[in-house]
Amino acid sequence: GSYQSCGWIISGVEPRVSFNMVSTESCCDFIRVDESNDADFTSGVTQLASFSGSSAGQQYQSTKRYLRIHFTTDGSVTNSGFVATWGSSWSTNNDSPPECSPCEAG
């Protein structure tokens, strides 16, 4: 959709995410992957990646407790977005995705 700002937080021991497909507008729709030991992502945040366009196969694993995927879009072209799988060293949970929550683009 247009003008989206959405975030998903994955928690666990060494949380990870793999992007199986990415198709976003390369100039204006971005996926950012951050890690933190703080569930609110207000301190100790490290950006692992920021990307857009068409690609597949990116994999990110956190050494911290939480991993956040933040997706922002503008109002012009609408592509299909992305498909990802996620888990942690102790579990994999691809059946019920984490809730998408509005988040600040900080």
Image: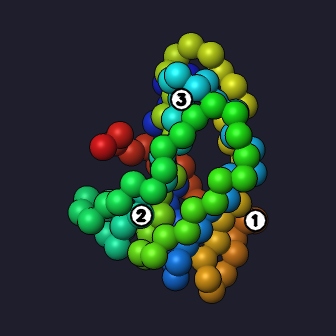
> Considering the numbered disc 3 on the image, is that residue within a helix, a strand or a loop?
loop
Q: CA distance from mark 3 to mark 2?
A: 20 Å
Mark 2 surroundings within 10 Å by alpha-carbon count, few (fewer than 14), some (14 through 19), many (20 or more): many
* On screen, residue 48 above or below 73: below
Asked whether residue 80 appears in the rendered view, the answer is: yes
Residue 97 visible somewhere in the drawing: no
Quadrant position of the C terminus in the picture: top left
Label whose residue precedes the other's in the sequence (3 or 2) = 3
Q: Determine whether the residue tagged by mark 1 lies in a helix, strand or loop.
A: loop
Horizontal side of residue 57 vs 27, given as left or right: right
Instruction: Tell me, for residue 29, which label it has, or none.
Output: 3
Residue type at numbered disc 1: Asp
The secondary structure type at the circle numbered 2 is strand
For image coordinates 56% across by 13% down, the residue present is 76
Q: From the image, state whether disc 2 or disc 1 is nearer to you.
A: 2
**Residue labelled with disc 2:** 35
- Which residue occupies 39% across, 45% down? 103
Q: Mark 2 or mark 1: name the one nearer the start of the chain.
A: 2
> Which residue has dot 1 on it?
95
Q: Amino acid at mark 2?
A: Glu
Amino acid marked by disc 3? Asp
Q: Which residue is found at the position 62% from the left and 16% from the top?
A: 77
